[in-house]
Amino acid sequence: MTTISDDEFVLRLTGSQRELKAFIFALVPHQGDADDLLQEVNIALWRKRHLYDKNQKFMRWATGFASLEVRSFRSRSAKSKLCFSDNAIEALAGEWPNTVSFADDCRHALATCIQKLGRKERRIIEDRYTKGLSVKEIAAESDKPISTVYKILGRAHEALCECVKRTQIQSNQ
């Protein structure tokens, strides 16, 4: 087993928070419960950090702890209407790292595809999704009719979808 320094462990732990929370929230229907469970998982991971082999995938190791915490939570709140079986939780824990990797690949492909858009389309996409401007604000700022902004957004969305699909097909070959 190859040990890891506390600093490196903290980097891996903090870098995994978004994915860990998404995993937990997929299994626990309430945001507050998911937040509480994430904290419990973080504590458990920290306490067991000496057992982590830095050559193994951190998310696979961490989701194992998270699935145990979710099962424990589920048994404590058995009166809840929405419960997953232990087998379902284990199956999700096993597949979650692949899902996270797929999402990361999609984000990377999208970033690449945005750069391939024309200047006008890219600017409107960035105004809408990076700056959070409404279509009405974009229209006013660019001195274009609202209908034109919607058409440009629609064309850009279609181009991005096709580009991301092509990129993923190419990367899977």
Image: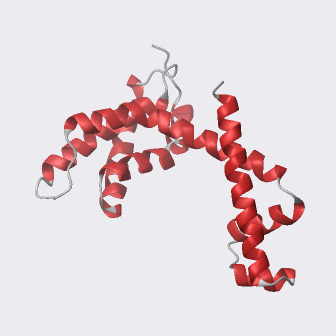
- The residue at 14%/51% (across/down) is 76
**Image coordinates for residue 160, horizontal then vertical, percent:** 71, 53
**Image coordinates for residue 17, horizontal then vertical, percent:** 48, 47
- The residue at 82%/51% (across/down) is 115
Instruction: Answer left or right for 31 relative to 76.
Output: right
**Image coordinates for residue 74, horizontal then vertical, percent:** 19, 49
* Figure quadrant of the N terminus: top left
Depth order, front residue of 79/111: 111
The answer to whether residue 117 is seen in the rendering is yes
- The residue at 21%/55% (across/down) is 82
**Image coordinates for residue 59, horizontal then vertical, percent:** 46, 34
Depth order, front residue of 65/129: 129
- The residue at 50%/49% (across/down) is 18
Q: Quadrant of residue 117?
A: bottom right
Q: Name the residue furthest left.
A: 79
Instruction: Answer left or right for 15 relative to 22.
Output: right
Depth order, front residue of 128/168: 168
The answer to whether residue 130 is seen in the rendering is no
- Figure check: 86 above or below 79: above
* Figure quadrant of the C terminus: top right
Q: Quadrant of residue 131?
A: bottom right
- Figure check: 132 above or below 40: below
Instruction: Answer left or right for 46 relative to 108.
Output: left
